[in-house]
Image: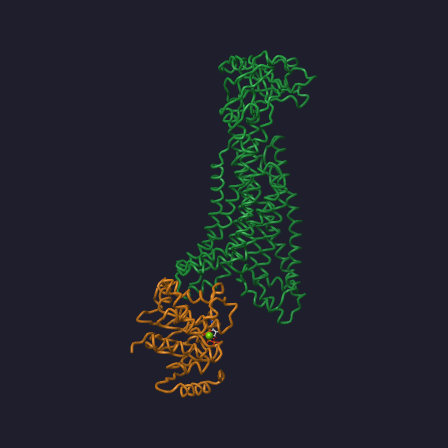
């Protein structure tokens, strides 16, 4: 009997339930999409290296996934509260008719359960379909080979979704029961009329809170800049905490401040529907500032992952040609019992090569240059205590001869070699003389080049010294640089494999690294775009849902405006203003946050090579604008048709 | 005198086929410039429906409504909006205030959508509030007002634009006799000094006694008409009571 009543209630107020249902369904869908990321690899041909990279990424993503659960839980509880609020009057009438609270809350629980079940399965089905299409699209975009068509289903994501959402439903039901049993009848009956109760009373207090929020955000920015995103230290933690608090306080006080500013400008306030629009916005912000803050943080995460991911992609790309001058480099760390490679392997058989020995030194980078302070803090920390490596003049000349470069001749001089742009800039400011075995050497010149194949151009500095100074030293590394190979890559690998007994021996074949980098790049870009998409979409969808409920909630208000003779054009304009403010408020603060964040994180990426922050930001914002813009337009069109329908 | 409003054979049917409600069933009348007309009738007799058709909020099923030589049934909806905000003032049965706006803002809204000068808006609202004795509730939101206060705010909104026709649906329904008198005196002021034409629906004989003429409606049709002429209000009140007793049932004695 109760089941029937609950079902009837849902049918009766299906409009209210629709938005609630859509929010939850969409939440579950996104949750599944996000967590099914790992199973995406089933669709792609991945070599072991890529697979490891994906698994590692997945591990760090599990933290993000936890955060997402919290966010979605909040969204759902919010949607639920919203629903209860809209039905408070109905519940109040039940009560005046003498129905017991216990029975009412039982009916509500049943209603929530029914909707929960339907939306859970709808969400999962949507998620499964969605993840499938998403992987096809992304794979196409990055030209990843696809295995033959197979339907991917992530059991992990499926189970996770069911467990997490059951817990959330449980919490929600307890909340509902609590809500109904504790609340006063008069409040239930008056509920629909009491929404615009201002949260913060008084001009002074809202200005104060606003100031505090700005200060808190400032301190948070300062902390993250100090931390440099290099470690999870206390600055990092405090920056996050203060950032959250600052954002919350910002939106909490914003509407009060804005109302004050605009109300004092009577010319503006008393024109057309401005007064109405402002009141609408301010009551909306007042009742949803927590939600807006969460959306801001979600957008921040989306932008952060997206543009930092893009940054890494472009670093990998830019460095490729520079860091891979040879067809192949074999390198081996030398210690007391290692046998030189050319004793074991017939190098001439493999190709045209030069053997090069690298020696350690105790010269530190900051002895050579007084200008390491030009590096930003994080880079400087990494590099300034770096001990420079050394190579002999004759070795370099052998290399130069093979590569058809200019030979060098040293006369109590040294040559500095690096392949990092920043280091080059520093060295150009002037290098110091060095004393080596009681001999004073002056800098001859500096070369911006790579001496061997590397995964990334990351040689901060190596110096070439006259042969007689190097001779007494013990080498730390032996390199075999091949300009050309006489055999195919597979054959070369087969020839070298038996000698690869430990990790001190590295085989760096240009074509292989290029292929691997491409794969790594694909994965990073894939994940970055995936996360960015999921987060931006969840923001925009909740904003759109919010606005649409708002529109259907306020039909009466707009109807009244029309009765009073307000033209449709003016009403549409007011709607446009309201929706724009509501959509772009979280976006603007998120952009400010992410400019700071991306600037900091880019300096980390920058250690590996210069990235073009601007163009990454541009791509990110273009991308966000596209999603944002289309939802904005849809929301605007849909709301105006809701508000202006019938006559 | 020239008629401001001319209603000819107006019909408004609700529902379809099987269950038709003839809310307004062939009503014709005229209102001349500067007249203060009351509409009386039992609950459900079609008063609000008539008012909604005249105010262009609802569309009539058939018949003609001519306001200032303009046939309302044929005006385009864009023009209707302009017409409503320029020429008409409404007081709805259910107040219809915007609950997000304060009393002041609700009243001012009628002027801002006419693009009036902000300085004069403040002055006019102030003056109107004084007249209706609602100065103390201008900063309150509707949910903080009593029913009577809401009604007075709604009345202020309807009158502030000096409309040529005021349509009022039970404006004194929620007021005590003192506030009701205050409101009716403002109507009278508007009617006499500013030549506003007023059409007012009411149940209450005392309220109706302020009118020049009363049209009685029963089941969507005109049942009777009373003209005050040169009578005192007291005498007119007694005439109204007589008709109401005759009509039976729905009598609101003071
Ligand atoms: N939207 C509608 N749909 C169907 N029937 C309606 C609608 N609006 C009014 N009616 C019916 O039309 C008739 C006249 O209604 P109306 O609201 O005009 O009455 P009224 O004279 O204003 O009554 P009251 O004094 O109680 O306000 C009633 O029988 C009512 O049920
Ligand atoms: Mg009525």
Q: Residue A217, how many percent across, how many down?
A: 55, 47
Q: Is residue A420 above or below residue A525?
A: above
Q: Colour of chain A?
A: green
Q: Quadrant of the N terminus of chain A?
A: bottom right
A509 horizontally vs A577: left or right: right
Toward the top, the furthest residue is A468
- Which one is nearer the viewer's eye here, A280 or A81? A280
B103 horizontally vs A535: left or right: left
Q: Quadrant of the C terminus of chain A?
A: bottom left
> In this rendering, does residue A319 appear at all?
no
Toward the left, the furthest residue is B1
Q: Quadrant of residue A17?
A: bottom right
Q: Residue A622, how many percent across, how many down?
A: 47, 42
- Which one is nearer the viewer's eye here, A144 or B55? B55
Q: Is residue A127 above or below residue A481?
A: below
- Which one is nearer the viewer's eye here, A475 or B198? A475
> In this rendering, does residue A101 appear at all?
yes
Q: Residue B40, how many percent across, how many down?
A: 43, 80
Q: Quadrant of residue A358?
A: top right
A234 horizontally vs B152: left or right: right
A34 horizontally vs A628: left or right: right
Q: How is the image coloured?
A: by chain
- Which one is nearer the viewer's eye here, A312 or A523? A312
Residue at 60%, 63% (x, y): give it: A8
Q: Quadrant of residue A327?
A: top right
Q: Colour of chain B?
A: orange
Q: Is residue A19 above or below residue A503?
A: below
Q: Residue B169, how many percent across, how many down?
A: 44, 74
């Amino acid at each position: 009997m109760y089941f029937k009543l609950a079902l009837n209630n849902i049918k009766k107020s299906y409009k209210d339930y629709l938005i609630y249902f859509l929010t939850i369904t969409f939440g579950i869908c996104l949750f599944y999409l996000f967590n099914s990321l790992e199973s995406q690899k089933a669709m792609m041909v991945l070599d072991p290296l890529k697979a490891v990279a994906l698994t590692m990424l997945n591990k760090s993503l599990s933290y993000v996934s936890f955060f997402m659960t919290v966010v979605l839980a909040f969204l759902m509880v919010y949607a639920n509260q919203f629903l209860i609020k809209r039905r408070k009057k109905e519940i109040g009438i039940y009560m005046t008719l003498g129905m017991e609270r216990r029975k009412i809350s039982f009916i509500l629980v049943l209603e929530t359960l029914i909707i929960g079940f339907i939306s859970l399965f709808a969400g999962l089905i949507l998620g499964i379909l969605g993840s499938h299409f998403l992987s096809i699209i992304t794979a196409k975009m990055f030209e990843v080979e696809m295995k033959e068509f197979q339907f991917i289903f992530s059991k992990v994501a499926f189970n996770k979704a069911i467990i997490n959402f059951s817990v959330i439903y449980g919490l929600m039901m307890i909340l509902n029961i609590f809500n109904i049993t504790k609340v006063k009848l008069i409040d239930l009956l008056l509920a629909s009329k009491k929404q615009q109760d201002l949260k913060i009373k008084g001009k002074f207090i809202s200005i104060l809170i606003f100031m505090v929020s700005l200060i808190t955000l400032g301190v948070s920015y300062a902390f993250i800049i100090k931390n440099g995103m290099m470690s999870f230290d206390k600055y990092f933690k405090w920056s996050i905490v203060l950032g959250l608090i600052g954002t919350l306080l910002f939106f909490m006080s914003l509407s009060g401040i804005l109302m004050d500013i605009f109300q004092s400008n009577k010319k503006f306030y008393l024109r057309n529907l401005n007064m109405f629009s402002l009141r609408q916005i301010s009551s909306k912000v007042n009742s949803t500032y927590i939600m807006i803050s969460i959306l801001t943080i979600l957008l921040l995460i989306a932008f952060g992952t997206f543009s930092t991911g893009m940054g890494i992609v472009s670093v990998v790309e830019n460095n490729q040609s520079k860091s891979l001058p040879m067809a192949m480099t074999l390198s081996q760390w030398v210690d007391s019992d290692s046998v030189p490679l050319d004793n074991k392997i017939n190098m001439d058989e493999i190709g045209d090569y030069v053997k090069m020995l690298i020696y350690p030194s105790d010269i530190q980078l900051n002895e050579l240059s007084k200008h390491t302070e030009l590096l930003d803090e994080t880079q400087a920390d990494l590099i300034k205590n770096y001990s420079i490596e050394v190579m002999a003049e004759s070795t370099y000349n052998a290399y130069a001869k093979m590569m058809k470069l200019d030979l060098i001749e040293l006369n109590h001089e040294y040559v500095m070699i690096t392949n990092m742009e920043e280091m080059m800039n520093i060295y150009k400011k002037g290098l110091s003389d060095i004393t080596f075995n009681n001999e004073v050497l002056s800098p001859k010149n500096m070369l911006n080049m790579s001496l061997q194949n590397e995964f990334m151009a990351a040689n901060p500095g190596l110096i070439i010294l006259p042969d007689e100074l190097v001779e007494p030293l013990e080498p730390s590394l032996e390199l075999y640089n091949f300009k050309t190979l006489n055999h195919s890559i597979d054959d070369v690998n087969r020839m070298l494999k038996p000698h690869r007994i430990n990790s001190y021996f590295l085989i760096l074949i240009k074509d292989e690294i290029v292929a691997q980098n491409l794969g790594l790049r694909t994965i990073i870009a894939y994940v970055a775009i995936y996360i960015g998409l999921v987060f931006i979409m969840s923001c925009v969808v909740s904003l759109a849902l919010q606005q649409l409920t708002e529109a259907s909630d306020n039909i009466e208000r707009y109807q009244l405006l029309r009765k009073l003779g307000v033209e449709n054009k003016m009403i549409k304009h007011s709607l446009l203003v309201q929706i724009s403010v509501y959509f772009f408020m979280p976006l603007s603060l998120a952009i400010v946050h992410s400019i700071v964040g991306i600037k900091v994180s880019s300096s980390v990426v920058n250690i590996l090579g210069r990235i073009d922050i601007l163009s990454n930001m541009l791509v990110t914002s273009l991308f966000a604008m596209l999603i944002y813009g289309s939802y904005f337009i849809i929301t605007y069109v849909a709301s105006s048709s809701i508000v202006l329908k019938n006559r | 005198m020239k008629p401001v409003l001319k209603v000819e054979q107006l019909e408004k049917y609700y529902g379809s086929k099987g269950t038709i409600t003839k809310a307004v069933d062939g009503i014709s009348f005229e209102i001349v410039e500067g007249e203060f007309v009351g509409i009386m009738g039992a609950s459900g007799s079609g008063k609000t429906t008539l008012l909604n058709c005249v105010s262009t909020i609802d569309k009539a099923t058939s018949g003609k409504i001519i306001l200032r030589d303009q046939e309302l049934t044929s005006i385009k909806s864009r023009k209707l909006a302009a017409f409503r905000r320029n020429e008409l003032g409404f007081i709805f049965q259910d107040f219809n205030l915007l609950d997000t706006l304060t009393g002041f803002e609700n009243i001012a809204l009628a002027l801002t959508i006419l693009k009036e000068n902000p300085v004069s808006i403040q002055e006019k609202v102030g003056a109107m509030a004084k007249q209706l004795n609602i100065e103390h509730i201008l900063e309150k939101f509707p949910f903080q007002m009593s029913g009577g206060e809401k009604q007075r705010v709604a009345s202020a909104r309807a009158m502030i634009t000096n409309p040529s026709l005021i349509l009022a649906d039970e404006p004194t329904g929620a007021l005590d006799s003192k506030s009701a008198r205050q409101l009716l005196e403002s109507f009278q002021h508007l009617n006499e000094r500013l030549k506003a034409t007023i059409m007012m629906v009411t149940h209450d004989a005392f309220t109706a006694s302020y009118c020049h003429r009363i049209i009685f409606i029963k089941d969507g049709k005109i049942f009777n008409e009373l003209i005050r002429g040169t009578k005192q209000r007291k005498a007119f009140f007694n005439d109204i009571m007589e008709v109401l007793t005759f009509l039976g049932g729905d009598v609101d004695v003071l």
